[in-house]
Image (cartoon, rainbow, N blue to C red):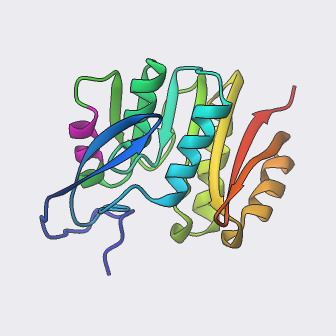
Amino acid sequence: MSHYYTNEETPDVPSSFTFDIAGRTYDMQSNAGVFSKDKLDEGTRILLETVLTQAEPAGPVLDMGCGIGPVAKVLAVEWQVPVTAIDVNEKAAGLARENTAGLAVDVQVANHVTGSGYGTILINPPIRTGKETVYRLLEECVQALADAGRLWIVMRKDHGVKSAVKHLESLGCQVERVNRDKGFWVLKVSREK
């Protein structure tokens, strides 16, 4: 069975959709075999709305697990800062490149965080990959933060967000739940000094 977080061959079924956020309409090219191929998923929408209303623009930005690039696109437009967007799925990364063309976005194919010194990191963790992978990604994100950087995470309450909070706290992080909506929690994470 093919999953969006793999690179298994999937049919080529191009599609597109739009979404509205922060008073703008964004057009996205999509395809079969990628996460949330038909619409902006609710968790990502809640994450974006929270960050856009509660965070000070701080770059550079890392969009970890970028999928087809909606977070990278919105933050590159709204904040006017450089964005690195990473996804393990080659098809998704290709679409992210297409969707962010002309913006200050560097799309990479990888299964780990690259770079460091990020002012803002956003992640909607790939829960179906398992707790070990999710925790590894969260740990890598924390390590890649600038000293005053913030990691923003969206997770469903019933997908282990409370244990993720405990794990992050065990790493010496300050974790604050800054939004709760439709079963999703948005966490703001910083490294303690």
Q: In the image, 170: left or right of 75?
A: right
In the picture shown, does residue 157 fall above or below 140? Answer: below
Residue drawn at point x = 50 percent, y = 59 percent: 42
Residue 170 magenta-highlighted: no
Between 120 and 53, the residue placed more toward the observer is 53
> Who's the residue at 76% across and 34% down the image?
190
Q: Is residue 126 above or below residue 152?
A: below
Count numbered badges in the picture: 0
Assign the magenta stretch its main secondary structure. Answer: helix
Q: Is residue 184 above or below residue 113?
A: below
The image shows residue 130 at horizontal and vertical percentages of 58, 69
Q: Residue furthest bottom?
A: 1
Q: Is residue 98 magenta?
A: yes
* Quadrant of the image occupied by residue 69: top left
Question: Picture coordinates of residue 157 (x, y %)?
Answer: 71, 67
Q: Relative to residue 189, is residue 19 drawn left or right?
A: left
Q: Which portion, as a residue range, is magenta?
A: 93-100
Q: Establish if 130 lies above or below 111.
A: below
Give the residue displayed 14% in from the left and 70% down from the top: 11
Of 103 and 130, nearer the camera is: 103
Q: Quadrant of the N terminus?
A: bottom left
- State the image coordinates of residue 19 (x, y, percent, origin top left): 36, 48
- Residue at screen point 25% across, 37% down: 97
Side of 152 where 75 appears, left or right: left
Quadrant of image for the C terminus: top right
In the rendered structure, the answer to whether residue 175 lies left or right of residue 130 reads: right
Q: Residue 191 lies in what quarter of the image? A: top right
Residue 133's x, y, as percent?
58, 60
